[in-house]
């Protein structure tokens, strides 16, 4: 289990750091979405700037021992969740060095605790490791109180997990 895991809001002046981590994420994810780099050798991330102009988007770094270990992008653009205040994990990335050590689980639970209410977490159909990770984390976090649904977006098919962590 990793110690000293932090989740820190990304300030606009740290955008270039997040952009670089997004490139690593997109590289990893290209195994599933089959995207290629553009003419500049970059994948790019269409919505990056929106994380500082749209109040429903929230960017976070994951740090371990003060070092960058990944990021979590939260937004309110959901496919399955019906509540207008529902949150979605738009993107989630843990660098390989920090995987399978509890870093992602610790970080994502911090995010879930920070935003109470309805949640939606989607996984690409072919990303078996992601599907397993999210089911395990959400099973533990909610004590089994979640719903799994099939999802069909404009770009891909997959699975969605819905749960509500509102304080009753």
Image: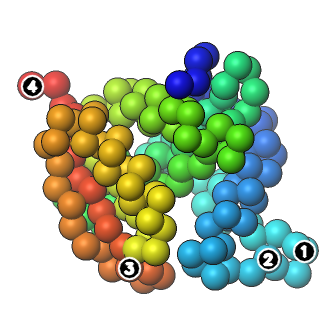
Answer whether residue 85 is visible to the viewer in this image: no
User: Which residue is tagged 1?
Assistant: 40
Q: Position of residue 96 (x, y in %)?
A: 68, 47
> Residue at the location (30% across, 73% down)?
151
Mark 1 in CB contact with mark 4 (< 8 angstroms): no
Q: Quadrant of the C terminus?
A: top left
Mark 4 in CB contact with mark 3 (< 8 angstroms): no
The residues tagged by marks 4 and 3 sit, at their Cα atoms, a distance apart of 33 Å
59 lies left or right of 74: right
- Give the mark, 4 or 3, whose residue is nearer the N terminus: 3
Where residue 147 sits, quadrant-wise, is bottom left
The residues tagged by marks 3 and 1 sit, at their Cα atoms, a distance apart of 29 Å
Q: Position of residue 142 (x, y in %)?
A: 21, 36
Q: Position of residue 109 (x, y in %)?
A: 39, 31
Q: Nearer the viewer, residue 30 or 136?
A: 136
Question: Which one is closest to the eye, mark 1 or mark 2?
Answer: 2
User: Which residue is tagged 3?
Assistant: 157
User: Callout 2: helix, strand or loop?
Assistant: loop
The residues tagged by marks 2 and 3 sit, at their Cα atoms, a distance apart of 22 Å
Q: Position of residue 7 (x, y in %)?
A: 56, 27
The residues tagged by marks 1 and 2 sit, at their Cα atoms, a distance apart of 7 Å
Question: Which one is closest to the eye, mark 4 or mark 3?
Answer: 3
The residues tagged by marks 4 and 2 sit, at their Cα atoms, a distance apart of 46 Å
User: Which residue is tagged 4?
Assistant: 168
User: Callout 3: helix, strand or loop?
Assistant: strand
- Give the mark, 4 or 2, whose residue is nearer the N terminus: 2
Above/below status of 36 relative to 147? below
47 lies left or right of 38: left
- Give the mark, 2 or 3, whose residue is nearer the N terminus: 2
């Amino acid at each position: 289990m990793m110690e000293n895991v932090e989740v820190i809001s990304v300030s606009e002046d740290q955008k270039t750091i997040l952009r670089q981590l997004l490139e690593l994420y997109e590289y990893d994810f290209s195994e599933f979405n089959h995207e290629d780099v553009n003419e500049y050798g970059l994948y790019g991330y269409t919505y990056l700037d929106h994380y500082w102009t749209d109040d429903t988007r929230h960017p976070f770094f994951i740090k371990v021992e003060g070092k960058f270990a990944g990021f979590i992008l939260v937004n309110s653009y959901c496919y399955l969740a019906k509540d207008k205040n529902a949150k979605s994990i738009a993107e989630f990335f843990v660098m390989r060095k920090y995987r399978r050590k509890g870093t992602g689980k610790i970080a994502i639970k911090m995010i879930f605790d920070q935003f109470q209410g309805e949640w939606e977490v989607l996984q690409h159909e072919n990303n078996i490791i992601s599907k397993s990770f999210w089911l395990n984390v959400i099973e533990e976090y909610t004590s089994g109180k979640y719903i799994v649904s099939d999802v069909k977006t404009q770009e891909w098919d997959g699975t969605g997990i819905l749960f509500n962590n509102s304080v009753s």
